[in-house]
């Protein structure tokens, strides 16, 4: 099988010649946009001979200046709907076009889209110049700012999220038009359903925006839902209309064994991006790959980390062990 056939087999529920494997990290500030971003992705793809490519997106939601775009309720009401091609959206679309021009027909790609709540969390703080793996637990001042906005005007927050969701839906549509095979929608409910906000806040004002974003990407054939953090309602995310479900099965759960008979989309995960990849040995990483396939049993699986990894901390030998272990698993033979 070639790389496209291998991934498509998994999406169709068929066992490929070996599990497709990929992993991703945020590139440096100078590799976010333009030719530098395109080349960074292509080098990463070639260096590790990955089976599919997640296109990173640090060209975040449009804002004016580097300061917080939302500091009070009045700012929420000033947010407008974008058509998905403006400013930073346009920068990301250029990156997608540049990558697809070099990879079309050779590998499938999905591009990152952060959901409406994560985007609002971004807008209430100054623009970030660097990005790394998200923390698995705990809150910070961004969460406190949104909680305060909810206390002041809950309806204004809900309406702002709807505006952001509509803009992101338009952007998702443009990503597919630019050549991406799908989007990699990052969602996280443990930031939302904290006691200070109310236990059903995600259902009340976020889930519909997730579905709206996926509606914008409905023309995609490789849409991935990334469940970040420790999911409060994993089952609700498992019902989303996507082709693949990716989550931190090692660091957050549930296990692949638990999900395999409860999740309709293809499974993606198996390797701990926070522990084994940075701190383990190549043998331990390879063991996680084999264990992931063992847990999946009859379900084909994409071998990936549960989220991004820090390239400054992860030994290259561990990444290569991940690729090698996946490719040593022959179709129908089960894990070695």
Image (cartoon, grey):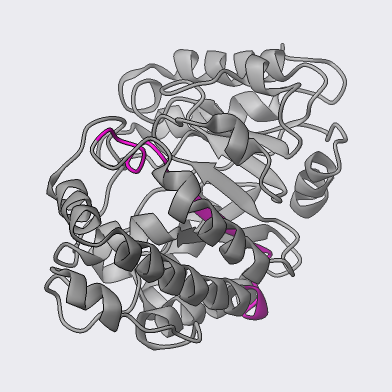
Residue 134 location, x and y as percent? 30, 41
When asked about the image quadrant of residue 145, the answer is bottom left
Above or below, 308 against 84 in this view is: above
**Closer to the camera, 161 or 335?**
161
**Taking 226 as reference, is 297 left or right?**
right
**Taking 3 as reference, is 122 left or right?**
left
**Taking 240 as reference, is 191 left or right?**
left
When asked about the image quadrant of residue 29, the answer is bottom left
- All told, the count of numbered labels is 0
**Residue 70 appearing in the image:** no
Tell me what residue is drawn at x 36 percent, y 76 percent: 33
Residue 187 location, x and y as percent? 46, 48
Above or below, 237 against 57 in this view is: above
Above or below, 326 against 13 in this view is: above
When asked about the image quadrant of residue 293, the answer is top right
What is the magenta segment's predominant secondary structure? loop
**Residue 125 appearing in the image:** yes
Residue 215 location, x and y as percent? 66, 66
**Taking 14 as reference, is 77 left or right?**
left
Tell me what residue is drawn at x 42 percent, y 71 percent: 164
- Quarter of the image containing the C terminus? top right
Tell me what residue is drawn at x 61 percent, y 24 percent: 325
Looking at the rendering, the stretch of residues picked out in magenta corresponds to 176-195
Tell me what residue is drawn at x 72 percent, y 14 percent: 335
**Closer to the camera, 208 or 213?**
208
Q: Is residue 325 shown in magenta?
A: no
Q: Is residue 194 shown in magenta?
A: yes
- Quarter of the image containing the N terminus? top right
């Amino acid at each position: 099988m070639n790389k496209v056939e291998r991934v498509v087999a998994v999406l169709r529920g068929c066992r490929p010649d070996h599990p497709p494997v990929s992993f991703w990290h945020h590139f440096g500030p100078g590799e976010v946009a333009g030719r530098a971003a395109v080349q960074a992705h292509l080098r990463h793809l070639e260096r590790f001979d990955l089976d599919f490519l997640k296109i990173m997106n640090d060209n975040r939601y449009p804002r004016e200046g580097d300061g917080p775009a939302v500091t009070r309720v009045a700012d929420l009401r000033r947010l407008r709907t974008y058509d998905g091609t403006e400013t930073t959206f346009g920068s990301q679309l250029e990156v997608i076009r540049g990558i697809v021009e070099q990879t079309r027909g050779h590998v499938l790609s999905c591009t990152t889209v952060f959901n409406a709540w994560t985007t609002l969390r971004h807008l209430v703080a100054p623009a970030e110049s660097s990005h790394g793996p998200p923390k698995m637990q705990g809150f910070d001042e961004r969460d406190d700012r949104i909680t305060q906005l909810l206390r002041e005007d809950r309806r204004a927050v809900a309406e702002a999220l709807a505006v952001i969701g509509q803009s992101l839906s338009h952007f998702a549509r443009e990503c597919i038009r630019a050549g991406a095979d799908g989007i990699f929608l990052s969602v996280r409910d443990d930031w939302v359903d904290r006691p200070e906000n109310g236990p059903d806040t995600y259902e009340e004002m976020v889930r519909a925006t997730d579905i709206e974003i996926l509606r914008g990407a409905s023309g995609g054939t490789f849409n991935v839902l990334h469940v970040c953090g420790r999911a409060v309602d994993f089952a609700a995310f498992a019902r989303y209309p996507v082709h693949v479900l990716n989550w931190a099965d090692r660091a957050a759960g549930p296990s692949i064994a638990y999900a395999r008979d409860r999740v309709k989309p293809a499974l993606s995960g198996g390797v701990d991006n926070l522990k084994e990849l940075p701190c383990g040995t190549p043998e331990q990483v390879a063991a996680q790959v084999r264990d992931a396939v063992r847990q999946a049993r009859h379900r084909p699986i994409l071998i990936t980390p549960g989220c991004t990894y820090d390239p400054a901390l992860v030994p290259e030998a561990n990444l290569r062990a991940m690729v090698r272990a996946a490719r040593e698993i022959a179709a129908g033979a089960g894990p070695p």
